Structures are given as C-alpha cells and as structure tokens.
Image (spheres, rainbow, N blue to C red):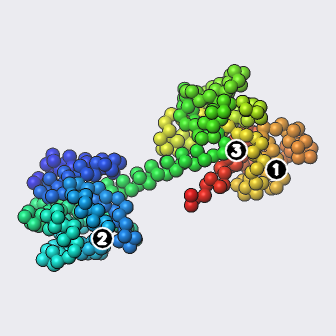
Amino acid sequence: MNLSDDKIEKVLDLIYDAAAENALWRQALTAIADLTQSEGGILFGQSLTAKRVYFDFNGRLDEACNRTYQERHMQNPWSQYMETQPVGRLVPSDEAVPLASLRKSLFYEEVLQPQQIAHNGMIALAARRDFRAAFNMCRSAQRGPFAPDQQRILEWLSPHLCRSVTLGFRIDGYLAMQQAAFDVLDRLADGVVVLDRKARVLFANAAVRQMADEGSLGLHQSVTTHSPAHSQRLIELIRGALQGGAGGTMSLPRHLDGRLLTILVSSIRSKDLGRLSDAGVKDAAVLLFVVDPANRRSIPLEQIMDAYGLTHAEARVALASSAGNTTIETAQSLGCSPNTIKTHLRRVFAKTATGRQAELAGLIAALGSVRIGDMNPRD
C-alpha cells in the first residue's frame, strides 16, 4: 500500500484528533487494524510494578479477555520483553517469544486463544520509570505474522502514535490544572465573580452563589444587589472598569443581618486575561471580590508579613486598611496618629507594588481568601 494513500491520511488525522478526544482512539485502532489486515488493536498505559492499567482504548478486541489480562496476566512473555524495548520501535511478537513457546503459557490459553490471536505488533509509545504506554496490533494464526508492507505501515505510524500520546498527556494534564484552578476558586472564603465585556457573569464561585441564595446579590446575567441604590453604584464601578479605569470599592449591607460587605471591582490585567483565557473563560474583562471585612482580622499577621516582607506594624496597618477604613479610622483602631498610619501605608504600598487603598485591599482579600483547611492536598 502506498503511504500517501488517502486511507492512511485519514488514519493519521484520527491519531492526532485522539490526543484531544480520547474516545477517537477506538476508531483509530480499528482503522489501523483494517489497514494491516489485523483482528484489532489496543492502546494502554500500565505499570507492571503497581500491577495497574491506568487507561486502555480497545479497537475491536474482546473486552472480557482484556479484563482477564488486567486481572491475571499483566506479567506475560510479551509485556516482560517490551519492558526493555526503546520507545517507538516496532517489535514483532515472534521476536519476543516463539509462537510454539507462547502457546504453552496460561496467558495464551486465557487471553489470546479465545480471540484466536497468535501474533502481535508492539510499540512502546512512552516510558517513564515503571510506567509505559504501549500500542498492540493483533493478528490471528490464520493470517500469520505481519507482512513486510504491513510492518512498514506500522513503522511509519509509530512516531505519529508516540507524538499523539505525548500530546494527549500534556492536554490531559492541562485540563486537570484548569479544573483544579476552578476548584480553588470555589474554595475561596470570599466571593469571586468574573464578568465579560458586556458585564455578564462568566463565573461565580460558591461563596458568591451562597450570597445570592441569601438574597444579598443577584447573578441573573449581570451582578445586582438587593438595594437599587447599591446596584447603581456597583453598575458605575463595573462600567468604569470596563472603560479601562482602575475600578473601586463599595460597601453593601448583607440582606440577612445588615453587616457590611466590601465589593472590590477591578479591570482584569493582560496577564490575568491570558490565564483566564487558558482556563476556558473567554472575554473576561472585570473581576469582583466580595469580602466580609470582619473576616480580614482572622488572617494571621505572619501570613501578610511573609507574603510581602512587611514589618509587624506595617502588616497591622495593611490589614486594617483592607477593611475599607479611612486613615483616621485606622489610626483610632490601632491607637496611632494619622501621620504614623500614612507613613506605614507609604511603605506598604511600596512593598506590595500598589498605589492606593483599593488595590491593597484586593491583595489582602486574595491572600486571606483561602481557608487553609480547605486546601489540604491530601483531601
């Protein structure tokens, strides 16, 4: 068969499409089996040490026999031989073990013979420590070993299979990181809302959804509050951020008890746009933090000091200021003069690369918004 044949090109398309859509591996394996006059094929990732198959895609082979393989026959003459083979090399099964010897094994009796399989073309696609991803293309005794032209097809496809599997690992890992990022946002103690360029809600985390359930906020298309006057102020801040302004801060009484919440409105910077776009949030333009200032006092001063290199006095001023207090109110609460507060604030702004109180409040809100207990990596 000519390697420029349309059938091979279609198989190649399937192989690369399967990197992003794993369900297509079954079609790709079946198409390769048809090209090479094989009974079927399988692609899997496993660890012989852990005795575990992490994934497998079956193209026209018997599922019951595959389960038997995973339960009792991961250690077999073929797999043991392939543990020492380099990635990308096509290995005919007769090289690993002669068919006459293979037929004496329980592996042949319980896994291969029920499917009338006697020959295999094997390729290690990826290897790391005790993990291997592998490709097998199986033929019956009646069809015999692969002919030279069929071997040539498999050898030609080998680098493409390797690249697709490696790309698939990266995509799967990337998707997992994206999902993890949203899991983290949902675990924030404070509310987070992402709006698009038309001020429509793209994302609202669990804390904000709870505030909506309590009646403090509305999340239908855009963000509203239970108070028309506060809603108008919020609209103005969002509009300013959409027009390129720095945003701002406002207070909102909770619907349940009247306790003041602080809403920080900020336009999204270019580097954050890239991160959100990578995570699947398109057209993000405005970010809202909905903070309960009373909870800011629960942030350990050491956490703020370590994060920004602040002194103890500077951290106290940063924390008090992040609650939305004026300079005079901060001075009164800390027992200092307003001039002392201003001096500390100048140093805090310099160390945190902020220029005003609203930006500082955003940093402190983000720093204090993760509940440590919620972020236990062993959960």
Secondary structure of the residue carrying numbered label 3: helix
Secondary structure of the residue carrying numbered label 1: helix
Measuring 16% from the left and 67% from the top, which residue is drawn there?
113
User: CB under 8 Å between callouts 3 and 1?
Assistant: no
Question: Disc 2 or 1, which lies upstream in sequence?
Answer: 2
Locate residue 19 relative to residue 107 in the image: left or right. Answer: right
Locate residue 20 relative to residue 231 in the image: left or right. Answer: left
Tell me residue 202's x, y (percent). 53, 34
Q: Quadrant of the C terminus?
A: bottom right
Circle 1 residue: 316
Circle 2 residue: 72
Classify residue 57 by image quadrant. Answer: bottom left
Tell me residue 220's x, y (percent). 57, 27
Residue kind at label 1, given as amino acid type = Arg
What is the number of the mark on residue 365? Answer: 3
Is the residue 208 above or below the residue 94 in the image?
above
